[in-house]
Image (cartoon, rainbow, N blue to C red):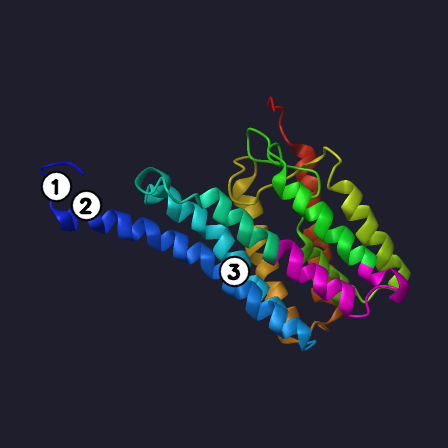
Amino acid sequence: MDPTESPEEAISPRAAAFAVHVFTACGAACALFALIAAVGADWPKMFVWLGIALIIDGVDGTFARRLRTAELLPRWSGDVLDLVVDILTYVFVPAYAIATSGLLPQVSAIPLGALIVVTGSLYFADRQMKTSDYYFRGFPALWNVAAFYLFLLELPPWFCALAVVALAVLTFVPFHVVHPIRILHLRVLTIVAMVVWALLAIIAVADGLAPGFWIVAALCALAIYFVGIGFLRRHHPG
């Protein structure tokens, strides 16, 4: 502590920085609430909690950088905390939902659920999961989003099984997926698309995951945009 700094001045920035960690950790609570909803087969409520966790994950990094959390609290790793929460909300709870909801053929449901958590865990352990310019490499273990579309589209179980296998394989294929906040290229358009997607997703969840055709079509079109924009990545090393 700077000797010219009063105790109040020293504590306040650290308290604000620690509040960011608490905020991030609230994502784990959302995972618990989502899992409880999933056990009760209340899929819309599960997606409400996963959506809240997604919002927390989308903004906590901005708070951490502005409040210099890493600098002020070197004891606490925001990166590790973020990964712990992400594995719960992006992978574990969605894997449970996909495996137990009847979306998959009964004989393959549990093995494919295991495939999701194994490949998702490996992805989050990959030190090169992001490029130097913040694109994700491979399918970024967004199993919460994948589960949302599987519930929304109500595809035949065999097709859902193929989709799960394909996404698990694509986890290790080095194509690029846009980070909607941190990528400068077309960022305004991407953020607008993300906001529209969020609004449509809210409508879909409010309608019990059975919205009208145009809502589903628009959500699918936006998914194509988010995948396609990664192929427009300008060349950067890494």
Which amino acid is tagged 1? Glu
User: Nearer the N terminus, badge 3 or badge 1?
Assistant: 1
Q: Which residue is mark 1?
A: 5
Per the picture, the main secondary structure of the magenta-coloured stretch is helix
CA gap between label 1 and label 2 equals 6 Å
Q: Where residue 24 appears, x then y in whole percent?
A: 45, 54
Residue 43 seen in the figure = no
99, above or below 14, in the image = below
Q: Secondary structure at mark 3?
A: helix
Q: Which residue is mark 3?
A: 28
Q: 73 or 197: nearer the eye?
A: 73
Number of other residues with Cα within 10 Å of mark 3, as a class: few under 14, some 14 to 19, many 20 or more = many
Q: Secondary structure at mark 2?
A: helix
Q: Quadrant of residue 216?
A: bottom right
Which amino acid is tagged 2? Ala
Q: Residue at x 11, y 36 (%)?
A: 3
